[in-house]
Structures are given as C-alpha cells and as structure tokens.
Image (tube, grey):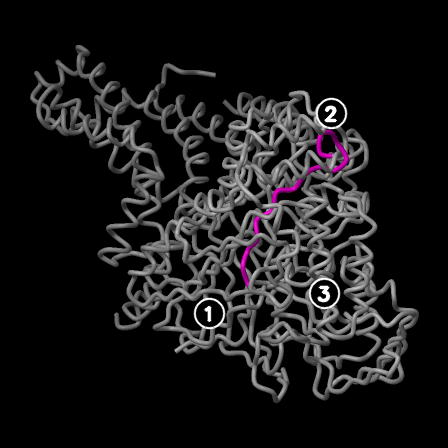
Amino acid sequence: MVRVLAALIALLLPLSASAQEKVLRAVMHADVRVIDPVWTTQTIANIHGALVYDTLFGNDADQKPQPQMVGKYEVSPDRLNYSFTLRDGLKFHDGSPVTTRDVIASLKRWGAKDGVGQRLMGYVTEMKAVDDKTFTMTLKEPYGMVLESLGKSGSSIAAIMREKDAMTDPQQQVKESVGSGPFIFAKDQWVPGSKAVYLKNKDYVPRSEPPSSFAGAKIPGVDRIELIWMPDPQTAMSALVNGEIDFWENPNIDFLPMLEKAKGVKLLKTGKVDSTQGMIRLNHLQPPFDNIKARQAMYYLVNQEDFLRAIVGDPKYYRVCHGMLTCGGPYENDGGSQYFKEYNPKKALQLLKEAGYKGEPITVLAATDHNTITPATQVLIQAMREAGINVDVQSMDWGSVVTRRAKKEPPAQGGWNIFVTTTGGVGSSNPVLHTWIGAACQKGLFGWPCDEEIEKLRNAFGMASDEPTRKKIARDLQARAMEQVVYIPFGQWDVPLSYRADRISGIVPNTGLAVLWGITKK
Amino acid sequence: MTSYIVRRLFAVVPVMVVVALFVFFLLRFAPGDPAAIIAGDDATSEAIAAVRAKLGLDRPVVEQFAVWVWGLAHGDLGVSIFSNLAVTRLIAQRLEPTLALTLSTLIVTIALAIPIGVVAAWKARKLVDRLAMGFAVLGFAMPVFVLAYVLIYFFAVRWQLLPVQGYSPVAEGLWPFAQSLILPSVALGVTYMALIARITRASMLEVLQQDYIRTANAKGLATDRVLLLHALKNAAVPIVTVIGIGIALLISGVVITETVFNIPGLGRLTVDAVLKRDYPIVQGLILVFAAVKVVINLLIDISYAFLDPRIRY
C-alpha cells in the first residue's frame, strides 16, 4: 500500500532530478532556427553563436576590440603583418584543442560569406599557421579595421569552429554546432520554433580580465540557459510577471507601463549605442528615385517625431537623430543634417515634379506584421498622400517584403520604390560595419545606391590609423551619404531589456547582441 | 463492412495526391522566399541568390515537385530549410503536446457538453434550458484568444493557480502535465462545447417527441433510462457527426491556443513554417492533417453502423 502511494505521489510530482540546477529562462526576439552564425545574418543566430562559439577578439563596453581567444598579438610597424597566438586552455566542446588550423579555416569561411569579412579578406594576402597556437596574417595595404572586424558583434560574428565544420561551403549551414565558447549547445533538446538549450561548459577557461560586454572573462553564470520563443508578446509579459521566465529581451513598447509596475520586474535601458535606427530606403535603380532631386525631396516628408511617436510613444525611449551614424556613438556628427530642414509636403511634391515626377504610382512595400516597421510605414504613406503623391501601397507580411525588396525590376513587374526597415545602433555606429550606409551599386544592399565617393570614404575610414582622422572621414561620409540619400533616417529608439531583478543579476547593456553567459541566478 | 473499409482506405490515395499537388504548388506560387529570410537583413541580392541555389529553390518547380514526391514515395518528408532537421523528427517532437491538448479538450468537452445538451432538451424552455443555451451562445461567440487571455489573467496572473504558458510532458509528472493543459483545454473547448451542446439538445428534442419515448414514459421507466438509453442512443448520429467536424475545428483551433499558451505543438509549427516559408514542413504537416481528417471521417462513418443498425454499407 505504501509503495503504491509512493508511486502515485512520484507520478504526480514533477521530476526533481535537476532541482538544484540553475536555469536561466530567456525569451528572445526570435527563435533559434539556424545554428550557423556565419550562414545567416540573423541576430538570433548570432546570439546562439556567441554562447557556443568564441571569437579571436571581442568588443568591450566602449566598442573597442580586446583579445578574447588570442593570448598575445603583434602588429608590424607598417601595419601589414599581424601575428596572433592563441591563449592556453582553449578546447572545443568535443574535447579537441583549438588550433590555428581551425582558426584559419573558420576565418576563410567567414571572410567568404560576411560583408565585413569579405572587406577584410580583400586586404589579406596570406594567413599562415606558424604552429598549433600561432598564425600570421599578411595584408597588402594597412587596413585599420582588422581587430574590429574579428571582434564584431551584431551580424555574422567571426565564430571559430572546428576545421571540419569550417570546411563546409559558406552557402550551406554547418550540420553541427560545436564551438569552444562558455556554453554547449544541447542539440538533442532543441525544438526549433520553441526552445534551444545550452549547458554550461565546465571546461571553459575564461580570461583573467573582468568581463566587459564581449571582452574579458566569460564566466558561465548558470548551469543551463533555455532560449524560449514566445510568438505572443502578451503571453511573454504575463510569463515574466508570473515569474515563469527570467528575461525578456524585447518587450513590446505598449507593455512597458505595466512592466514598470510589476513586482520583481526591472527594465534596463540598453545604452546609448545599443539602439535601433529607422530607415526609409529608396530604390535608386527605378524612377523617380534614380534622380537625386527626387530622393532629396523625400526629406521634406520626414518629421522624425511623427515616426517615433507612432512607434515608441514615450520620449524617454526615443531620440531624434538627423544622422546615419548612431547618435550617441563615437562617430556621431552633424554631416548632412541640414537636409532635415522642415516638414513640408508641398515642397516635397514640387521638388519631385522638378525631378520629372508626373504622378506615376510610387510603390511602397508595407509590412503588416512588424511592431515598429508597420507603424513607421503608415506614417510615411500618410505623409506621401498629404503631399499629393500617388502611393501604391503593397501590403504584405514582413517575410514577403524581405523577398520582394530583393527584386531589381520596375515596380509594375514586381519591383518596388520604397520600403521601411531598421538597423542596430552598434553596427551603424561604425562606417565600415554599417553596411546600409554603403553605396556599392548592384553589389550593395537593396535599393542599390551607387556612389564611388562613399565607397572611397568607407575604405579611407578603414585605412585611417588615428581617431581624429577617422572622425573627420566619418563626418564627410555621412554628409555625402545624406546628400546622395543612401537612405532617410527617421530617428533612434531603445527598447529596454526586461527581467526579474529578484531572481537574476549581471545583465550587460550596450552590446548590440544579448550577452547571456554572465547572468547569474539566485 | 470490411470491403467498405478497404474501399475507403484505397480512396485515401487520390485524396492525398490531390492534397499534395495543391499544397506544393500553392506554396510555390505564394509570395515569399525562404532564402531571403535565411540570408537575413544585411544580405545582398547575390548572397540571397547563392543561398537559393544551394537549397535548390532556383530549380524548375516541376523538378522540385518530382524530388519531393520521390522522397515521399520512400517515406521521407524532407528536411527543414532552416534547421536542417528531418520534417518527420520535427513533427514527432510536436505531436505529444497537440495530441494531449486535443484529447484533453475532447474528453472534457464531450463529458460536459452532452449532459448539458441532454438536460437542456429534457427541461426545454425552462430556466435550465435557457441558461444552458445562453452559455452555448456565449461560448460559440467568444473568440478563443479572448477567453484565453481572460483565463490567463485570472487563473495565472491574478490568483497564481495555474501556469501562464508552456507544456510539461507527461514524463515529467502527471500534475505538471495536467496543470499545463487545464487553461488551454478550457479555452479551446468552450466553442466546441457550445456546438455539441446545441446539437445534442436539438437532436434530443426531436427524439423526445417520438412515440416510443412516450411509450417508455407511459410504461413508467425511470427518466434517466429514458433519456440515456432510449433517447440519447437514437439521437447519437448527428452528435457523432458534429464531434467529427469538431475535431477538424480543434485542429485549426490549436493554432491559436498553442500560440497564446506557448505550447510547442503542431499548430505552432504550422504557423511558424508558413511565416518562414519553410516549404517542406508546411507540405509535411498538411499531408498529416489531411490524413488525420480522412481517418476521422472514416471512423465516423463506421460508427454510424454501430449506432444505427438501419445503416448498412
């Protein structure tokens, strides 16, 4: 009888084998579906990558690259030769040591796929292993962004993989996610579209320096991290308030007043650089925006406050920023800000007419399912209508916008004239890492702005060796990009992180990518 | 009966072929490109094209269809474009939560709705009947997600009696398993309950007018025996039909319920796959859902013969 009762109680109670395990349950902005941070530029794949993989360098809280896997490094006086030595104790999760063969293969794969990596590899003539721990990198020109590129966060981090994984075609996803980072990916517990599980890497040897964003010691703070995907923000909010989750990366702005009042919940502003920047992208290949005058006319339709109020509402979470390089970042400047003179729809239409616009429909790709892009697009459409522009609104889900914006054909044949998007403040604080400011014509990003001067300035920035020169180039670059209307910025906002302050600590803001390994649980 | 079942099973093949053709070409002609989603926001057109080529999405649609059908013929539903995992594994991962939710909803619903319908018919046009039918109208009119949020607010956030979200597998304990299903089952079941209760009432009312019921009452049979043995059994055919239709409703209902309660089931998998244009998953799921629907229809047809001896195939 006693045995039967015991068996019944055991069945009713939750299994307690892992009761002592400290588990961080975090709801992120998206689900982990792709486990290769090089194959995609998706931020969530990079959050996964930053837990599982290590990088040679990591950016600190001031966005300065610091050695991470590298123990020591030397740069020749002419800045053409780099020598890197890996620090002691680096091991992949399968127990094999990290060698320079793994590093070189990984950098080659990353350099073939990622935009920043491609730019770096354009200057690299040779990468050579001296021994298992030391390798050299030889450049043909003294490119000044080597360490920044190797330590970049945001999209497609330079993750160091096992050589056999790194030999995978860059256009294909790696089959296994085995890195040398502070957490081990538990593939057998992975439910794509629902949950990804990471276990503490007990063999990880952290650096001795104090942690600072992606730099310094990466000390796993919990035994297990569960990245949970909750498509419904209302559910995520209730789960956080109820204590079922510990961390919610991007709470909806509508919910912030409720979260501010919730017991045990804290909101943390993500920092001055780690913000989101809004962008209106015009198609430079198709009329009327193949004409610079028509593009500049669009500045008269943008009152940033209108956009920011529609998206964010509360002024404490947004700021007007008339620049393309992140306001609050190291290269913030006023280059080209004179284009935001006034909101004047009549003037916009007049300039468009002078540019040859005769009332043809202007196709706007309007995402219907995005919490910031959707309202921003509606504000733009309203301003265009107020000006008397013939707006052809193509409403679709964001997945369809992403597909259609890649089409270079005229709007009537499935192309487009305008779409609205956003970019991360950390990446856009640096002229080289900010890919949307580029103007590499057909090889560039959607909209395909084409300007030799802009590309020259970005290269010059990469070559500059001192900060005053970089700042001057950054200003010239932004002024030129604003003149050419590479895109129209409509302000910056920073959605705070939300978490259970009564349960976890060690949240790191201002990173551009969620830093989860150092979070500890009471 | 056996020959009828065999014939019906053979008829499944053309149905599935039509479903396969329809879902494959519908997806291919719908807007959206998984390669663009995979490549991410900062990818160039060239990078997207390279991903598309590697995934084989740039090949002619007919060729893609042939590859898929060849895989199907070998029991292979393909692999997810995003996660690189087999679609069969992904469906298997999600099967338990959806089955648990559907079955618990079904059990709770039938256990409550049929008695409500029977009592309402027995006490027709009286207060009990009006209350029951008022509940039915309200239950049918209230969207699942509204009820779900109301339940979450009171039972999870305010009174902290049940979890807001998530699914606890039965292997992790019966009570956590039951806890994770109570609110979703109620939210999902109310509409269904309303439907079955109304049909049961209507069907029972018709049967209760019959002469043999009057005879049974005149013989002095107990009310419960009249209602349950004589009336309900003869009113069962339309009720079973509606239960069958209701299972199809449940399958579509789990999409919303699983999203609101964050249950990692087949409904969530379907929505996510559609939004991401993960073609192999959508195709695999639609085939599975179609097969389930066909089997349920077959079971309902067979049940008619048992419930009503006059029905012969």
Mark 1 residue type: Leu
Out of A170 and A370, give the one closest to the viewer.
A370
Instruction: Point out the tag, 2 or 1, that comes first from the N-terminus.
Output: 1
* Amino acid bearing label 2: Gln
Q: Position of residue A125 (x, y in %)?
A: 92, 69
The 10 Å Cα crowd at callout 2, few under 14, some 14 to 19, many 20 or more, is few
Residue A288 in the magenta stretch? The answer is yes
Residue at the disc numbered 3 = A472
Q: Residue A241 got which mark?
A: none
In which quadrant is the N terminus of chain A drawn?
Answer: bottom left
Looking at the rendering, the stretch of residues picked out in magenta corresponds to A274-289
Element under disc 3? helix
Quadrant assignment, res B226 = top left
Of residues A222 and B200, the one nearer the viewer is: A222
Mark closer to the chain start, 3 or 1: 1
Q: Is residue A419 magenta?
A: no
Q: Chain of mark 2?
A: A
Q: Residue at x 71, y 35 (%)?
A: A293
Q: Is residue B310 above or below residue B226?
A: above
Tell me if A276 is positioned left or right of A473 in this view. left
Q: Which mark is residue A413?
A: 2
- Callout 3 and callout 1 share a chain: yes
The residue under label 1 is A24
Task: Provide the chain ID for the residue under circle 1.
Answer: A
- How far, Cα to Cα, is label 2 from label 3? 42 Å
Tell me which chain the residue with mark 3 is part of.
Answer: A
Q: Nearer the viewer, mark 3 or mark 1?
A: 3
